[in-house]
Image (tube, rainbow, N blue to C red):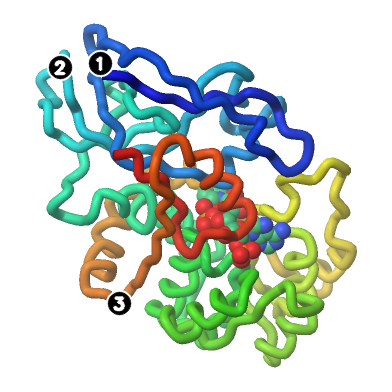
Amino acid sequence: MQATEIRLASRPDGFPTMADFAVVDTEVPAPAEGQILVRNLVMSVDPAMRGRMRDTKSYAPPFAVGEVMSGGAVGEVVESTVDAFKPGDHVLHQLGWRTHAVVDAKHAVKVDANAAPLTTYLGVLGMPGLTAYSGLLETAEFKEGDTVFVSGAAGAVGSVVGQLAKLKGAKRVIGSAGSAEKVRHLVEDLGFDAAFNYKDGPVAEQLRAAAPEGIDVYFDNVGGEHLEAAIDSINLHGRMAICGMISQYNATEPTPAPRNLVQIIAKRFTMRGVLVLDHFGLQKQFVAEVAPLVASGQLKYEETIVEGIRNAPEAFLGLLNGANTGKMLVRIT
Ligand code: NDP
């Protein structure tokens, strides 16, 4: 048996390229005591991985140049040295970007392929879903009757934010995304009240037209011009959950601060960062509430699946370019 893994070949300067990754064929590793050998079936690519390609201090350590990258994955146990896992079990763990992973048993979580498709444990019922749930309900303190604006709305996190807000009684939900097809998807498939393509014109103007009475909640996945537009449109005592700023992840120069932040005084709105790692305590509550909504089709999800471990770098670049609708995943076997 041969294994394949993706290593970070170099640190990107600006938008990453294929040359920043190395696809390496190697031996299948053997598990030591307390470990399991997992054949990965599907892995996640996430915007946060762009941050870890940079050599800067953050909440997660940078990837080392020359070493295999990592991230969420679901696989099948093929060999186990512990009683808690048996060959054939499906597990969620953090050693993606490789076909075979030796995982410390304490860092693996069993998942049930009969309860939900395995891919959903990396998307709507996994980390992105929990980010949406905790960011909307805890960080932004969403309440019934709010008008909600979410950027990156057709992506893994954004699509859950908008739909949850609707299901929980939002007055109006507005989303922005980067193509006409995504805008159609938001309104016609996911039930957003309004959506616009941020590439069609100034975001502030498009948002004002979509939310003439202003917004009460902004869920930020994008930053930059979107954040400025949200500041312009936010109502008195509005709340912002700052979840991501993907428009700035490949910047080579310092990015401008929101130029209109002075409005925070008159409007007394709040801006709070959300980091999913702080909210794992909500995981049980989140799954108990959201899994039935997914199963019944009340909360819909899309996945964009790229085939084959060798195409993982392409999937990651595609994610940064908006090639995905819903969760971007790589099917390994
Ligand atoms: P998505 O599924 O939303 O994929 C990323 C999307 O970003 C792309 O599909 C693309 O869609 C959009 N995008 C790329 N470049 C730009 C740009 N310059 N301007 C506007 N949109 C852009 O990813 P996730 O749902 O996984 O993540 C969404 C955000 O949430 C990211 O910012 C991520 O970093 C953040 N996040 C934060 C977490 C936390 O704990 N704080 C946890 C998980 C995610 P389009 O076609 O619309 O441009």
Image quadrant where one finds the N terminus = top left
Residue type pointed to by label 3: Gln
Determine the residue positioned at 43% across, 58% down: 304
Q: Secondary structure at mark 2?
A: loop
Q: Quadrant of residue 182?
A: bottom right
Determine the residue positioned at 85% across, 50% down: 255
Which residue matches tag 2?
82
Up-down: is 230 above or below 331?
Answer: below
Give neighbour class at mark 2: few <14, some 14-19, many 20+ (Cα, 10 Å).
Answer: some
User: Does the residue at mark 2 contact the one at mark 1 (Cβ under 8 Å)?
Assistant: yes
Q: Secondary structure at mark 3?
A: loop
Image quadrant where one finds the C terminus = top left
Give neighbour class at mark 3: few <14, some 14-19, many 20+ (Cα, 10 Å).
Answer: some
Alpha-carbon span between mark 3 and mark 1? 39 Å
Note whether ligand 1 is within 8 Å of mark 2: no
Alpha-carbon span between mark 3 and mark 2? 39 Å
